[in-house]
Image (cartoon, rainbow, N blue to C red):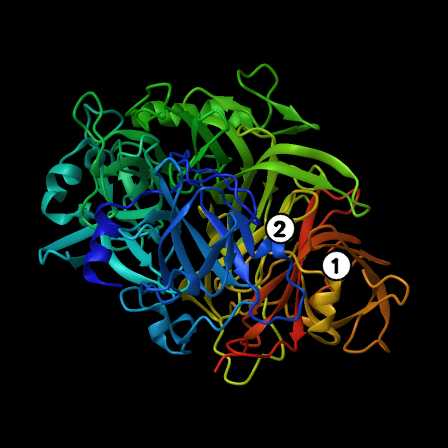
Amino acid sequence: MGAAKKLLALMLGSAVAVSALAACTPADEETPSRSTAEVYRICYDNLGDGYVDDAYTSVALDGITLVSAYNSSGRKVSDISSIAKYENGVVTGVSAGTVVYQAADGTQSYIEVVPAYVTDPGSSFYYTGFSSDFNELNSTVLGHTHDPSIIEAVDSTGTPVYYIFSTGWADQTTYTTLLGDTVRTYGNAIHVSYDGMKTWSYLGRTFDYSVRETEFVNSRAGAWLYREGVDSTTTGTPTTLGTDAAYSEASASWWAPDIVAKPDGSGYWLYTCVVDGAGDSSGMRVDNTDSDDGRNPLVYARACILLYESDSLEPGSFHPVLDENGEPAVLMQSSIRRGETEKDVNGIDPQIIYDTEGNMYMAYGSFGSGNYVIELDPETGLRKDGMGWQSHRDIRNWVENDIQDLYNGVEGTEGVNIEDGKSIGWTHSYYGTNISKQNMEAPVFARHDNVTVMDEDENILEEGKTYYYTMHSYDGLADNYQMWGGRSESVWGIYKSTTDGIVYNVGPGNGANEGNKYMGAFTWHNKSEDNAELDIILPGHNDLFTTGAGTSVAAYITRQDGSTGNFVTQIHQYYLNSYGQIVINPNRYAGESSRPVSAEELFAYTDGGKFKMVVMTNNRDTNGNFNSANTSRDVTLEQNADDPNSGVIYDGATTASTQIGTWKMYGNGYIKFTFTETLKGTGNRDSEETVYYGVVRNAWLNDQYRSGFTITCLGQTEGNARSMSMFMNNYSTLSGDGLIAE
């Protein structure tokens, strides 16, 4: 991409319209649509064997004009028809690329054209197997990138560019603008992708270091973290205990942001949390006479969620939104006592969502009593109730009294809520509404509209539904990170599993855990030769994002096998099964379409009906050395002679293996599995599932370095309070130009 194009992508990029799309999953509409011209994604049949329906290779658009076209490398082509043809009001895909078009009213948008069978994403997509994979500054695979938030913009050509904002720790880097100016930056890290989220480049950090003293250190935010005592009129003492290193303003870390476009299109809001950087035993001492037993001083770890803004996505361009007192505007604070037994509320990990009426909300939280949501004012981006900076005294009073009673469901407590005999969904005047309970963090939202719910007999159970989905990271990030969550018809919840369990985590493998387990650690067996693909280790702290063209992805952290200090962010496509539940592709996103796959097509390109299967269970997913405890195994699917859309599944590499269940495909690439006994995973660990609903889709199979098919499912077994995911990759026989990595 040329320098001018990059500059305009950074400085003039606007939030792309998210709207009803052709041949794609529904959008979550994180930002309202502002364009009449809509975004579309279509395929071209790069194999030509007749399995791809015309409905997925074309879109009817009357009265448009094709303006320009760009190939898959982002280079402008002189012949637009080499990417897509427009005849008789229908645009038909020809080859991979993007076509910009103009609607009759003069507004412009674009059409993505992707291969029906995903092709080799290129050498920069792959891991090398060396330490460079985990380098934040030079890696193309999002090395050392933690807690991602994705946003889409449109560059100067009218085509999409994607950005990831992520945790920035206490690091600083320099950024050279395309005008030649050098800016020293700090805060949250920014990466950019010009090729549809396949490869990434590091840009810089969000804030200009030259104004750090005035905008942060000497502001109310700096005072809260490093100087303030029981209230703003008293002074506390940052106190280092045990073997912790000393900490100060230089230790401030900028964690887990969420980047969103302003609803009016005037720029961007960055919701970010700043933490004090104190060690695990250290923190603010607010009263020199305070101690837990007469010996150890009471100290508090502090954090807060702040709002920044910019008219661009350029590093160093974000500045704090100011409150009525000229201080950085705050949305949430926490002051957590070290060693406390109380169920606290942690003011970190913000995530933004809009409802169908344009109302705006922020989820947040980490461990303690659970995760919460508050309503925001879409005009200002701040709390709708107007609450700003609070004192340590008030926060500790709310935690030690109100939250304990609400968590325990004490009868008569204002805001208490009991669901099926459990305390969940309570409300508090400052903290908002509880949406999950206990040991989890990093709540993320997605909204999907016009959802149709259908059973395996293709009976329509619901249609036109709007659902809200949450995901949360259960357990510690260097302990047993897993991605769980639920679904609700309201932003406020109650969020539940496929079988009506609440989102509740007691601890690794605990029998009281509830929710949908979407992703856990696993490894593929029998990988291709010289395969450097990372196992999924401690996955979590994810984002859920739907592009303007309707592709839904989950971006989440995974770590190097056996090393929690080496990590990357990976992008995986996700879908809705026929019951409107999220299922995640276990393979990294390589630009593949989300078109449905038929049973005929699946078996035509599967070697002997053989698949690799991964079974998630309610257990710890990694061992003491942080290696995956879950490994795939071979299973075989066989078609019935009288009905090729159904058949049996065998637990082994051939049909001579033991039959363990049946399968049935229906609708738009949906699949149901029914097992004769609860499905077992590695080490005979029990999923407690006999019924799964999922989808069949084309994917770039990371274990084989080739195009093939994946099956991703979520359990839905009656009587369970939690639901486990299950994945399969076929032994692919697809071959042809670009279908096998070179």
Identify residue for label 1. 686
Q: Residue furthest front?
A: 88
Q: Nearer the viewer, residue 668 or 475?
A: 668
Does the rendering let one see residue 364?
yes
Does residue 215 sit above or below 412 in this rendering? below
The residue lying at 48 percent from left, 65 percent from top is 590
Q: Position of residue 451 (x, y in %)?
A: 63, 38
Q: Position of residue 605 (x, y in %)?
A: 68, 73
Q: Position of residue 725 (x, y in %)?
A: 66, 55
Does residue 153 sit above or below 141 in this rendering? above
Using a 10 Å C-alpha cutoff, classify the residue at mark 1 as few (fewer than 14 neighbours), some (14 to 19) or many (20 or more): some
Side of 178 relative to 139 (left or right): left
Instruction: Assign the N terminus to one quadrant of the image.
Output: bottom left
The residue lying at 48 percent from left, 37 percent from top is 341
Q: Nearer the viewer, residue 337 or 292?
A: 337
Identify residue for label 2. 517
Q: Position of residue 694 (x, y in %)?
A: 69, 53
Q: Nearer the viewer, residue 43 or 152?
A: 43
The amino acid marked with disc number 2 is: Lys
Side of 320 relative to 654 (left or right): left
The residue lying at 64 percent from left, 32 percent from top is 464
Using a 10 Å C-alpha cutoff, classify the residue at mark 2 as few (fewer than 14 neighbours), some (14 to 19) or many (20 or more): many
Side of 740 relative to 336 (left or right): right
Q: Nearer the viewer, residue 291 or 677?
A: 677
Give the SS element for disc 1.
loop
Q: CA distance from mark 1 to mark 2?
A: 14 Å
Q: Residue furthest right?
A: 642
Tell me whether circle 1 and circle 2 mark residues in contact (CB < 8 Å): no
